[in-house]
Amino acid sequence: MSTSARRRRRANIPAGAAAFLWLVIVAVPLYILVASTVQSRSSYLENGPLSLPGEFTLDSYRRVLEGDFPRYLLNTLIVTVACAAIVIVLAVTVAYSIIRTRTRLSRRVFQIFLLGLAIPSQAVIIPIYLIITELQLYDTLLAIILPTAAFSLPVSVLILVGSMRDIEEEQYESMALDGAGPARVLWQLVVPMTRGGISTVGVFSALGAWNGFLFPLILTQSRENRVLTLGLYDYIGEFRVDIPALLAAVVLSIVPIFTAYLFARRQLINGLMGVGGR
Amino acid sequence: MTTAPRRRTGRPGIAWAVPGLLFFLFFAAAPMLIVGYLSFTQWDGLSNPSWTGTDNWDRLWNDDTMRQAIALSLLLTVLTWLFQTPIALLLGVWAAGRQRTRALLSAIFFLPLLASSVALALLWKTIFDPNLGLNAQIADWLNLSSADLLGSPRGAFAAVLFVTAWQFIPLHTLLYQGGARQIPQSLYDAAALDGAGTVRQFFAITLPQLRNTIVTSSVLMVVGALTYFDTVLILTRGGPGDATTIVPFLMYRTGFQAFDLGYASAVATALVITATAVSLLLVRLTGFSKMRSTREGI
Amino acid sequence: MRIRTLRLLAATAACAVATTTLAACGSGGPSRGGGDTLSVWVYQDGSTVIQEEFVEKFNETSDIKIDLVQIPGDNYTDRMRTAMGSPNAPDVFFNWGGGSIADFVEQDMLVDLTPILDEEPELKDAFIPTILDAGAVDGRYYGIPMRGVQPVILFYNKTAFAEAGVEPPATWDDMLHVIDVFLDRDTVPAVVAGADPWTELMWLEYLLDRRGGAEIFDRIRNGDASAWSDPAVRWMADTVKELVDAGTFGNNFRSVNYTADGASTFFAQGGGVMHLMGSWEYANQLSQQPEFAAEDLGWAAFPTVPDGTGDPGALVGNPTNYWSINSEVEGERLDAALDFLRMHAEPEYAQALIDNGDIPTTANAESLLDSHASPEFARFQYDMVAEAPSFTLSWDQALPPGKAPALHDNIEKLFGGQMSPEDFVAAMQDL
């Protein structure tokens, strides 16, 4: 590293101070989150959120796990995996077609997806409720999966079109000389070459499905089909003033994503940046 | 003989896009048409919608609650941008450095992004509890008479602004971090030779170089702020009174609490039009529609 | 009609998409409610254990099984209503009678229980007549009582009152005195969970009822919005403003939730000394803070007010909750649903309610009072209900559901000082 570069980085005092301040702002709530969950309900009520837990107990986690939490988790996993699968399959085929058929029609298709970026899911929840009830899908996991996947499509198409652009024309040509049809080209060239983009899309749509709230809130009701976010919301009424248990549920809802983050940090970060349509 | 080689080039037809397109049109585009239609009806969710012409729209123009919701949404959007952009920009540029401490801190900053809005709103609701939360303790230390942040109109609005910023600043930091790392080091070296200090370098090099990132991040912020819903529902439920009833929440309240789904559709349509107009404008600025490769290594 | 074509189009296209995706991801949605099950919806709270127990008992003998769906939180009404508009509507559901089911009655979505009650006098006579009537719409029965009576009671902290040397207030002057005494002692005189406006509503209901009588809200409920301009309404709003300004509810009440138990815990910890709340507060304290419930918890009727023309014995609150049956339920399933409803007239059910701290709405309730955990509280509550000249259903349940959000907003603004009493009265007329 050159000396000038070092000086530039070291001298950035305002940003460093801001970073430290932000660290406090981020860390204190996270401390409260974790510290509250390892004490008993009465100790929390007596000592308040900032105190060090007097006696360490994991009882609040037990209370959460003994309830319906595992079922909510399973439902969320199903929704997440299904959404990611649908989005990947559909977005890859759409992007492939857009990239390789350069007609006015394919540009139109691309523009439709671009416009789709602007549709907020909140705004169409009423007709989606109508459609889902007409399909007899109200209060099923599919009611969450289908619209959630649909709303992940535009960004995903955008990301994949971006990464498929980077494949050289010569590579297509050499495969074509081998007599490969479009399916084989997709499978043997496009998919391997855009693995990064595909995992980004998968992670992004999975994250959206994992954290989605509005569709579950409006489109499902029963405990059998409750996903984590809706379950958390309902815990307000269920755990009432049992704040350690409530926050333990919050922690438990973050743990799976956090684990995924540890293992797939790069894809996750790319996925989040994928929100930006990069 | 002419058709055979062309077929061998292995290009897929537009048919490949049909399943994805239909799926998308069905769940995203068709609902937009339906919501537009419903905005001209009266519908209670139990019986069939009945056509009432422009009644809902006439009502919308003269509805004080709607007017206030629009004002609140716009205010929230502007304040969100003003609040989040400088912090994310500073943090992002700072985190672009490759020192180990910075990497570690970035990882901590990143944590709120992993949780759902619901989980975070629950956490903050607990923290803001006037009798049992951090609020009570801080009010106690500072000898304040009231810890009722979420109970006052301004406090509740500020809380929504802050909690959403707390949740989304990491995302924008990440965008700026990525952007800042793309800036060629040679630019800084040249500036340093000219004797430019950190602050001048920031304004002369970093900011102009990050122009595209700023636009991207702004689009996200603006569209995001126009559609905040989860946080409002859990943190303030649009209250106290209607002090935090922004447009998406008003739509929910009208549609799924008062079950005036026709009027709620009019509110929703207004929201779609606003969001689309804003995004179109900003998308044009970013040049997304030029179909360039925008992938960059991170 | 255009919406028909639209729906048809939507449905066909949706089916096409759904079948493809179904095949693709292979996770079919379970469809409930049909065949040999009944889906029964209940608001989830401290009393739900009783429903669980009796559903289990029912399922032991019946061929048609009940699937009990518990919905917690403050938006039960909204979610139930959303589901009722869908094909997956509940078969039997918990409600508050009155306005909460009026829309469904209008759309013929509920089973009219009147002929059944006429045919089976032993079923009809099992319940206190006024309670059964309170759930009726236009003189016809759509609900069977399934919870205890829930009058709003002025709960207070006996120990704190004794220490301060005051008695529970019988008149409004007493009330103002008690408030002063506790304000001097730096204690919040009355707990209210301002983030849940229905708790603030209880103050309004009693103030209006004591001042102007039950007729005023009766007129409102029947669609006469001009009744909001009665001087008693204005007095009620002025009084609330005076109470708030004096600090009666403390400085922090506006963001406290009842559903999250914020107010009840604060009350039990001694932060506040009065709590105007539905009778379920007793059962709630008994399960959450048993020590407080046993030693400190006192109860009284709401005091009289100056120049009040209302009966001092009149009550507000929820007479009880009811089960109603969806009119889509037919044949054997309807028979099973009716059998389930009949269980709630039996002595075992009343006993279960008593054991949970509730006062049943059955005619034999009086004989069971002594087996209540606190016979004194049981007797107090039972007499209160039995002797009440009127029992006004909570305004937000009695009015059509479409009006509840605006009602709640106005109340929050009145208590929050964002709306003057004058504006409040005007806003209520526009409701």
Image (cartoon, coloured by chain):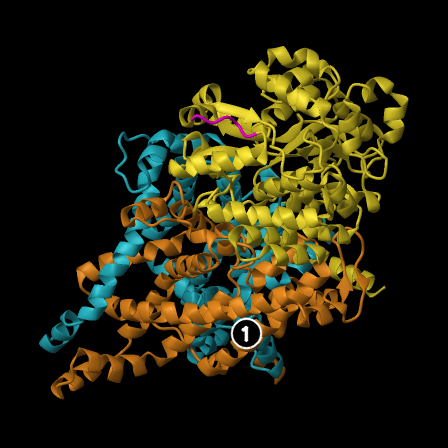
Chain colours: A cyan, B orange, C yellow
The percent coordinates of residue C108 (x first, y second) are: 84, 43
Residue C47 seen in this snapshot? yes
Residue C166 painted magenta = yes
Circle 1 SS class: helix
- Identified at 43% across, 35% down, the residue is C182
Residue B259 left/right relative to B219? right
Q: Nearer the viewer, residue C201 or C334?
A: C201
- Circle 1 is placed at which residue position? A114
In the shown orientation, is residue B46 left or right of residue C254? right
Estimate how packed mark 1 is, as few (under 14), some (14 to 19) or many (20 or more) residues with alpha carbons within 10 Å. many
The residue nearer to you, when weighing B65 against A250, is B65
Q: Position of residue C189 (x, y in %)?
A: 46, 37
**Given the image, what chain letter belongs to the residue carrying mark 1?**
A
The residue lying at 52 percent from left, 66 percent from top is B72
* Magenta span: C165-169
**Residue B16 vs residue C114, the one in the foreground:** C114
Q: In the current view of this chain or complex, which residue is farthest to the bottom? A: B194
Q: Say which amino acid is labelled 1.
A: Leu
* Magenta stretch: dominant secondary structure: loop
